């Protein structure tokens, strides 16, 4: 393997325990990083605006909450875990005035650095610790004594110790239990955006919805269509996760495997591959980033419309009804402690 992977023994937790860490934002990633760092013996302060709805939650969970500016002023390491579109404004208003030589600014995703929306001064370390999974799973895995693999990257090494500090941070959230892979801000940003748009979120959601539509429009029961197109996807993906596509194909019937081998490439055909390449091009050129920043600045008209359309899709109503009957779906991933 050509990538460098670091585990617990390669990381010195003492490096991050010796620093004060400000976590800016307390959402999916923010709560996971802050609680796990605290449980790893790190001095953590949360930075949130006065009116933030995340404030009571962080305080109930025993964390000290101050404004982003105060947190940035107090801390040696500032981890920015606010929404990507909010980070540029938070940086200009609250972080930049509180940076000083010897401090470090960390990110959970490289978007703002990769697209030049944030340009930290040369005297500070700039690094990334990006878990390869949703924040609620990051916290749950840490609490269960495990970890979610993460990517680490250094954009600017003013101290000469930025990678060691990033690895210490990764250890504090359980990342080096599973493995921390060294990468760059560019590679993390472009692959993360591609993965979520073409495969994991955009691709998978469209595949599931379209399959459900084809079955129900042909007169099959929505409940049966839901099982075939959504529910069983987890069971199939669990097998892929455990042992790759080969293990999934080993476990399914010969009939399913023949259908997979003979029909799959008719669904994901060369037109789909060309479209994936186009999407990657928009990410690499910065076109997607410009579009998303403009959409956010305009008050997210398309985002809101598409979100509402997705929520109103008939598969959601069917799923809500069916999940209520499934006693084994009893611990939502978004429930963490
Ligand atoms: N979601 C995930 O699992 C993953 C996210 N990432 C990256 O992590 C970062 C955070 O994303 P995510 O956890 O999804 O974010 P969320 O949307 O879940 O949470 C954002 C948090 O930031 C707070 N916030 C909003 N505006 C400000 C502000 N002006 N100043 C300070 N805090 C603010 C929000 O508070 P309020 O509740 O008041 O809105 C909320 O607590 C992003 O860079 C993202 O790309 C990386 C890997 C996976
Ligand atoms: C797949 C979506 C993701 O990239 C993630 C959980 O890793 C995100 O930005 O939320
Ligand atoms: Mg991701
Ligand atoms: Mg992402």
Image (tube, rainbow, N blue to C red):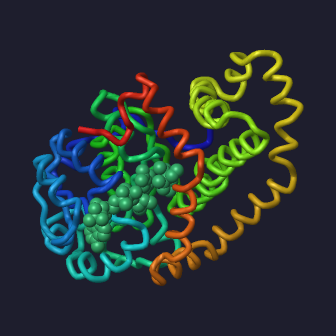
Q: At 38% across and 53% down in the image, what residue appears?
A: 163
User: x, y (%) of residue 159?
Assistant: 30, 64
> Looking at the rendering, which quadrant does residue 211 occupy?
top right
Which quadrant is the C terminus positioned in? top left
- Count of numbered circles in the view: 0
Is residue 149 found left or right of 198 in the rendered image?
left
- For the N terminus, which image quadrant? top right
Asked whether the viewer can see residue 104, the reply is: no
Inspect this view and state whether residue 268 appears. Answer: yes
Residue 233 pos. (x, y %): 62, 33
Closer-to-camera residue (142/320): 320
Q: Is residue 76 above or below residue 215?
A: below
Q: Looking at the image, which residue is at 47% across and 33% down?
A: 323
Question: What residue sits 85% from the left and 56% below the top?
Answer: 271
Residue 48: x and y in percent read 21, 67
Quick check: 327 above or below 62? above
Horizontal arrangement in the rendering, residue 264 relative to residue 211 (left or right): right
Q: Residue at x 29, y 46 (%)?
A: 32
> Image quarter for residue 291?
bottom right
**Quick check: 127 above or below 210?**
below
Q: Position of residue 77 (x, y in %)?
A: 24, 61
Relative to residue 231, is residue 150 drawn left or right? left
Left/right placement of residue 179 relative to residue 104 reads: right
């Amino acid at each position: 393997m050509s990538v460098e992977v670091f585990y617990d023994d390669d990381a010195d937790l003492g490096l991050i325990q010796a620093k004060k860490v400000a976590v800016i934002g307390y959402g999916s990633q923010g709560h996971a990083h802050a609680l796990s760092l605290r449980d790893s013996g790190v001095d953590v302060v949360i930075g949130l605006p006065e009116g933030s709805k995340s404030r009571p939650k962080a305080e109930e969970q025993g964390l000290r909450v101050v404004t982003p500016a105060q947190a940035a002023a107090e801390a040696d390491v500032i981890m920015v875990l606010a929404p990507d579109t909010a980070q540029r404004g938070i940086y200009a208003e609250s972080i930049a005035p509180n940076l000083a030589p010897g401090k470090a600014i960390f990110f959970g995703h490289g978007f703002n650095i990769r697209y030049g929306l944030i340009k930290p001064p040369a005297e500070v370390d700039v690094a990334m610790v990006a878990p390869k999974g949703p924040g609620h799973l990051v916290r749950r895995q840490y609490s269960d004594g495990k970890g979610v693999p993460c990517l680490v990257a250094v954009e600017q090494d003013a101290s000469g110790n930025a990678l060691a500090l990033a690895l210490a941070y990764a250890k504090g959230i359980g990342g080096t239990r599973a493995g921390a892979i060294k990468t760059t801000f560019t590679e993390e940003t472009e692959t993360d955006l591609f993965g979520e748009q073409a495969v994991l979120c955009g691709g998978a959601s469209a595949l599931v919805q379209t399959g459900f539509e084809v079955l129900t429009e042909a007169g099959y029961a929505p409940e049966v269509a839901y099982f075939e197109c959504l529910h069983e996807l987890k069971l199939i993906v669990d097998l892929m996760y455990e042992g790759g596509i080969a293990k999934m194909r080993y476990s399914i019937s010969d009939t399913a495997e023949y259908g997979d081998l003979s029909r799959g490439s008719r669904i994901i055909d060369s037109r789909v591959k060309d479209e994936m390449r186009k999407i990657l091009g928009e990410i690499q050129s910065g076109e997607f980033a410009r579009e998303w920043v403009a959409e956010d600045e305009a008050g997210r008209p398309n985002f809101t419309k598409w979100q509402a359309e997705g929520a109103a899709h008939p598969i959601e109503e069917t799923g809500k009804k069916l999940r209520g009957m499934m006693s084994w779906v009893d611990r939502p991933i978004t429930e963490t402690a």
